[in-house]
Image (cartoon, grey):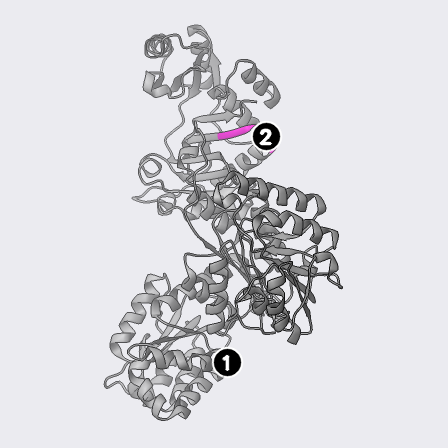
């Protein structure tokens, strides 16, 4: 999918990619981009250094000594040359009519050195004058899993991308992409944009909000250059799809004198927070919260209310679960009499309970038909807006390991419930003493589309964020984001 | 007073702080509910204006060199007679001149003393990164100590103004506590929106405080106003 006519469209959907200045023995950038060939694209190398050329050709990549010699129009280039050379490479890329380029090259204004600052200004003015799409510099460039363009060799190549991600930091961009993949969520398009001297976060955001492939947008930002444009773009983006904003670092107070009370109270963070609410963005503080928010948005139905049914396995956990959801400002309401009557027909109240929260292990006893029956009854209760269920590695891991089909049946029961129910559902699987085993079974949950969180608190926080987002969007937008 | 003429006057005098009388008159024209305030240059003018506005009145010093009026004995409250107004006028001029020697004193602002309402603050400042920003909070100790305020960028939509009010921790105070009637949230919302429109139309305004605004069961009224313009 693409956004026809948009200035970033070519570089975000590349067929011809050039890696400029990669060096052995690792040839990191060529290795990153080798999948391009299996995805139907063409990868070229540009390298002057004679002693590097055999290593490049050994990878099956054709090398040229100049950008201008590459036999096809370059849609995207990754530039990894020494900083002094970068203006010459940019000049050639502009002359060759390339669609855009990510500059891995660093050593610019971020160094604070005069030479770095001067070179950065030179790149910026050349690119601006030519209307050239310069990504970075001092960045990891683009990650386009569908095209086979990558910024890390472990990043998956896939058509299953749903998340557009923007990151001022290369590490956060890579880490988010890999951790999201481990949670069964994939990147549609990701830009690590570093110093953002030409294209800034608003440019990328504008593209991602129009891109059909991108269902939700996430970003890691420390600061933005054009605040008013960012505000306007983010507001528009949030109208179109959920946007999760992970803000890093303290926003520095601009040096200014204030003569008003208001001015003295307008701390940069408070203004930022107000703007986020005004735009309708979902805000997070770290990687885990960002992953969890994405999982909730992509895998769960849209929350329409704060009344939670909590399905715990045991009494102690039912109390902890209630505490966690209550602390997130969610309610744990009484069920209707009809629900109590239906549960009362079979629920084992010796060592169990079917108040809300439920304490249900003693009733289910490993029987998935009983679990299914409980899920159906609770789902039908009008007091219940959303459901959260504890899966306990403490009790289940031993059986799941011994009889893997019991795990499969559990997952299938939950997946059936989710397909049937209109209400959001979250599962909590604390790894307990079985972290390695639990990690090994996560792909099964991911493949079934069952959103699993590692703690009650994380599940509750993710539910809260999705609910707040849905409330901000209002009734009409809730319906559309539910399609996501 | 048109905005342009006030701006020209202030700039000609090298001021970035508008006088209270200037600020209120501009806001009043913009549809922001403010307590009508007039400038008296003499004792007699102060007394005539007090008669016209109705007792009790408040007198406040008007000087481009005095930012914090009450600190210099420049504010007299609850004046209920012609004699009290005359005496207060003399005292204000004397104590202001004592506290800030050489201060240019334009006169005294005369204002009908509005009945006490729930105190809130409505403000605007210019963020170096995001431009004009509106602020809302409860007045008095809530804003001074707890910094219980909310922000949104200009221009505000109605939803933004409502959220600003709903977002503060002290929000229950506006619903009426200890037998107090609830504050007129619609009037506060309209005030925020009018101020947002005003600053949007006049980018020369860099900062603005309406502190306090009295919130009543029916309506709202800004009893003090400061406007700071850019120096250009």
What residue does disc 1 label? A447
x and y percent of residue A22 in the render? Answer: 58, 61
Quarter of the image containing the C terminus of chain A? bottom right
Question: Horizontally, is A326 left or right of A296 in the view?
Answer: left
Quarter location, residue A45: bottom right
Q: Is residue A303 magenta?
A: no
Residue lying at 43% horizontally and 48% vertically, measured from the top left: B166
Q: Is residue B174 left or right of residue A148?
A: left
Q: Which residues are magenta?
A: B201-207
Secondary structure beneath label 2 = loop
Depicted B77 relative to depicted A186: above or below: above
Q: Name the subunit of mark 1.
A: A
A273 in relation to A430, above or below = above
Query: Mark 2 = which residue?
Result: B202
How many discs mark residues in the rendered view? 2
Location of the N terminus of chain A (image quadrant)? bottom right
Q: Is residue A14 visible?
A: no
């Amino acid at each position: 999918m693409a956004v026809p006519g948009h200035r970033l469209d070519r570089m975000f959907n590349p067929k011809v990619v050039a890696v400029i200045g990669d060096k052995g023995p690792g040839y990191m950038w060529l290795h990153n981009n080798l999948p391009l060939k299996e995805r139907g694209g063409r990868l070229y190398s540009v390298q002057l250094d004679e002693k590097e050329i055999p290593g490049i050709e050994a990878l099956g990549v054709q090398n040229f000594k100049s950008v201008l010699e590459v036999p096809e129009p370059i849609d995207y280039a990754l530039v990894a040359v020494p900083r002094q050379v970068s203006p010459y490479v940019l000049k050639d890329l502009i002359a060759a009519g390339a669609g855009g380029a990510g500059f891995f090259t660093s050593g610019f204004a971020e160094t604070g050195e005069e030479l770095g600052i001067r070179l950065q200004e030179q790149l910026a003015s050349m690119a601006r004058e030519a209307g050239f799409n310069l990504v970075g510099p001092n960045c990891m460039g683009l990650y386009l899993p569908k095209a086979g363009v990558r910024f890390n060799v472990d990043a998956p190549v896939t058509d299953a991308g749903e998340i557009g991600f923007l990151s001022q930091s290369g590490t956060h961009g890579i880490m988010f992409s890999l951790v999201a993949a481990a949670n069964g969520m994939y990147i549609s398009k990701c830009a690590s944009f570093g110093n953002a001297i030409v294209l800034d976060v608003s440019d990328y955001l504008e593209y991602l909000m129009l891109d059909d492939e991108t269902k939700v947008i996430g970003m890691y930002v420390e600061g933005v250059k054009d605040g008013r444009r960012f505000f306007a773009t983010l507001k528009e983006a949030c109208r179109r799809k959920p946007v999760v904003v992970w803000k890093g670092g303290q926003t520095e107070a601009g040096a200014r004198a204030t003569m008003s009370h208001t001015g003295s109270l307008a701390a940069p963070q408070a203004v930022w927070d107000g703007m986020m609410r005004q735009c309708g963005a979902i805000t997070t503080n770290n990687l885990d919260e960002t992953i969890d928010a994405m999982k909730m948005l992509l895998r769960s139905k849209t929350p329409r209310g704060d009344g939670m049914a909590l399905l715990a396995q045991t009494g102690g956990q039912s109390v902890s679960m209630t505490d966690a959801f209550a602390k997130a400002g969610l309610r744990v309401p009484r069920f209707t009499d009809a629900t109590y009557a239906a549960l009362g027909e079979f629920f084992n109240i010796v060592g169990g309970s079917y108040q809300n929260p439920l304490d249900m292990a003693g009733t289910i006893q490993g029987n998935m038909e009983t679990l299914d029956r409980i899920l159906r009854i609770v789902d039908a209760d009008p007091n219940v807006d959303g459901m959260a269920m504890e899966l306990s590695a403490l009790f289940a891991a031993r059986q799941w390991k011994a009889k893997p089909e019991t795990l499969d049946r559990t997952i299938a029961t939950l997946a059936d419930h989710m397909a049937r129910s209109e209400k959001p559902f979250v599962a909590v699987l604390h790894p307990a003493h079985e972290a390695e085993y639990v990690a090994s079974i996560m792909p099964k949950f991911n493949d079934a589309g069952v959103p699993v969180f590692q703690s009650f608190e994380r599940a509750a926080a993710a539910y809260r964020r999705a609910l707040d987002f849905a409330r901000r969007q209002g009734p009409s937008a809730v319906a559309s984001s539910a399609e996501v | 007073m048109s905005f342009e003429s006030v701006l020209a006057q202030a700039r000609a005098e090298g001021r970035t702080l508008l006088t209270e009388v200037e600020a209120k008159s501009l806001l009043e024209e913009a549809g922001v509910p403010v307590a009508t305030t007039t400038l008296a240059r003499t004792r007699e003018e102060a007394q005539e204006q007090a008669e016209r506005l109705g007792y009790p009145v408040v007198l406040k010093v008007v000087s481009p060199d005095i930012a914090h009026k009450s600190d210099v004995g420049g504010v007299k409250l609850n004046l209920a007679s012609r004699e009290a107004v005359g005496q207060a006028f003399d005292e204000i001029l004397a104590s202001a001149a004592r506290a800030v020697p050489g201060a240019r004193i334009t006169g005294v602002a005369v204002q009908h003393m509005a009945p006490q309402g729930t105190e809130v603050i409505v403000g605007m400042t210019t963020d170096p990164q995001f431009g004009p920003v509106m602020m809302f909070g409860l007045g008095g100790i809530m804003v001074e100590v707890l910094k219980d305020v909310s922000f949104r960028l200009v221009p505000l939509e109605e939803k933004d103004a409502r959220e600003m009010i709903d977002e503060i921790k002290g929000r229950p105070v506006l619903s009426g506590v200890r037998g107090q009637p609830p504050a007129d949230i619609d009037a506060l919302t309209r005030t925020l929106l009018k101020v947002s429109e005003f600053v949007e139309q006049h980018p020369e305004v860099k900062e603005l405080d309406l502190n306090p605004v009295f919130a009543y069961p029916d309506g709202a009224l800004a009893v003090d106003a400061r406007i700071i313009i850019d120096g250009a």
